Image (cartoon, rainbow, N blue to C red):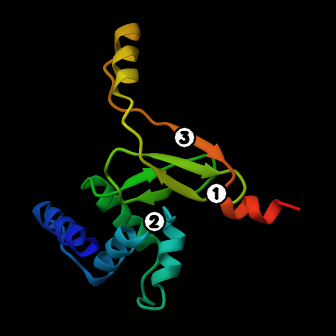
Amino acid sequence: MVSERLAEAVDILKENGVRMTPQRHAILNFLLSSMSHPTADEIYKALEMTFPNMSVATVYNNLRVFKDAGLVKELTYGDASSRFDANMKDHYHIICRHCGKITDFDYPTLTEVEVKAAEETGYQIESHRMEIYGICPSCKTKNEP
């Protein structure tokens, strides 16, 4: 499945005139394989042994290219560093208040909320975001007596 998504993503980038470099391919593959919503630094650290000449700036620049092409979402939650998500389906996130782990949570989209918000305010609704906070199972286990 990741290989199919990777091939589709490469096609989209090529259609947008983006040349595929080995670094771009590796970053994209890492994102599509990852369920951890990594930061640019985490991606860099995961790939630095394979690409010792790649910089963190290269990772950031490529993430921006992927974001502009509609292949990744940039997630900004409270802490200073953005996290990146290659799952472009509508879904929500549960965030651990202790360790910051982000887990995908599928739920029917809240389109009724968007319709109601538009009706009551006159706004043209573009999107919405719902965040759920709690303690992940790992942190819960660590903190139990």
Left or right of residue 137, residue 29 in this image = left
- Per the image, the residue denoted by label 2 is 35
Location of the C terminus by quadrant is bottom right
- Per the image, the residue denoted by label 3 is 131
- Per the image, the residue denoted by label 1 is 100
Residue 3 x %, y % = 24, 75
Residue displayed at 38% across by 15% down: 116
**116 in relation to 55, above or below:** above
Location of the N terminus by quadrant is bottom left
Residue 77 x %, y % = 57, 47
Residue most toward the left? 15
Residue most toward the front? 145
Quadrant of residue 31 in the image?
Answer: bottom left
Q: Amino acid at mark 1?
A: Gly
Residue most toward the right? 145
Alpha-carbon span between mark 2 and mark 1 = 14 Å
Q: Label 3: how many residues lie within 10 Å, few (<14), some (14-19) or many (20+)?
A: few
Q: Amino acid at mark 2?
A: Met
Q: Element under label 1? A: loop
Residue displayed at 40% across by 16% down: 117
Q: Label 2: how many residues lie within 10 Å, few (<14), some (14-19) or many (20+)?
A: some
